[in-house]
Image (cartoon, rainbow, N blue to C red):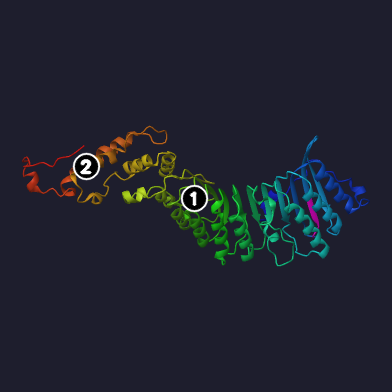
Amino acid sequence: MRQQTALFRPTYDSLDLRPPPPLRRQIKMSDKLNNAISLVTENKPLSFVFGLDEFSRARVWVRVSNRNGIIRHALHHELDDVDGWNQLGAAIGRSKITLRKLELNLDEDYNMNISNEGFRCIEALFRGLQSISSIQDFRINTEFLSNGGTLPLFDMQGARFKRSLKRLMLFSYDNAITDDQSDVIGSFLESTSLERCNVRYCIFDVTNEESFRRIMLACSKVKYLAVEFTSLSQSAAVAELLADPRSILSEISIFGNIDKERLSTIAAGLVDNTTLKCMYLHDYSEDWSPMIAALCNTSSIERIIASNHTFKEVSSEKNNAPILLQDYLTLNEETNKSLVIRTKIARYYFRGDFDISTFASMDVKCLPRMLTMIGGGETNSNAVTFRKEDAIHQVSAIFRLLKCIPDLCNISSRDWGHSGQVPMKAPSVKK
């Protein structure tokens, strides 16, 4: 977890507007804040990052665009100038800026020890940030959502950017998500329509299943989800999300310890899903049969029909998906789902010694329809193409079916005669 935190921290590879080191001690803290206020109000801010280090000092990065291009301004500041932070918060609230990205973070070693003045400084800043309506990318440490009063809370529900927000990233370091935090996150997710939600860097207590489940079920209105889990119960919560008929999730990335049992649980939720198109399994290298069965369960024709015909892509770090699974995924790319079902039945059910008991007591009039099912029908699709081996399997399946017609259609030897005799009245077949 500690190595991943560098992903959230801006670099100093651009212009730093702080004065040279020898002069820093001669400038008051309020002057630094005034510099930040001018930067926000006189330019076009693109991103704003606020963080607290292990000494409870504030770190602010403002990325702005002006006539000289895009620059970053870094501000390291003691949280003891309440008036200055009030002015910065008020300036942000009053200005008609089009801030696109906002991040509120904590250092890994932050000790949750903050003064009353520091508390008020952060509150003032948060009030200004909550009044901005243009933010589309929001990243926040969950300690700012619920923490028992040790830190100011950022009101996500009351934030004006809730309607414009498209991407949300939540992260924590050493503390697991609490019930209160999961309630806050769940309520927010249910009231927004996000394109992307990333909870991969959140820590969940494996003994508290409901906290993880609460957040997963709230992601039904999210289009992309990144998540990491470590227990079977957490994989069951992901499966429940996939099986939710209200879910519009189209892509999911799953990290963590994934074995065959957990993949089986996820695949069970995928069977009835019609919106998910892509799945990324970070480090899976075991048996893919659960996913194969979810896309085409060949135990019966009914099971094939009930399988998933919309899921199109699955990948992993080792990229080891078997050929049969890839064939199913290719078929699912066809938009005509009736054609997909017919092709799956023709290719993967009528093969070898397939179960003919399904057609017991079949009316002989159904024979043309059975032959059509074996043929799979005409195809004019790039996703569904006729293969050489398909013809071989079709001939074999037709022979097996015709050989079993007397038993399947309940036609007795008296009707068909004995020793090759012509039957008295052959059954008619309508085309």
Residue underneath mark 1:
285
At numbered mark 1, what does the secondary structure look like: helix, strand or loop? loop
Q: Quadrant of residue 45?
A: top right
Q: Which residue is drawn at 66% across and 56% down?
A: 171
Which residue extends farthest top?
380
In the visual, does 229 lie left or right of 379? right
Seen from the viewer's position, the closer of residues 160 and 4 is: 160
> Given the image, on which type of amino acid does mark 2 rest?
Leu
Seen from the viewer's position, the closer of residues 297 and 142 is: 142
Seen from the viewer's position, the closer of residues 300 and 134 is: 134
Circle 1 Cα neighbour tier, 10 Å, few/some/many (<14 / 14–19 / ≥20): some
Which percent across, then down, holds residue 75?
82, 50
- Residue 339 versus residue 409 in the image, above or below: above
Residue underneath mark 2:
367
Which percent across, then down, holds residue 191?
60, 55
What is the magenta range?
A: 56-60
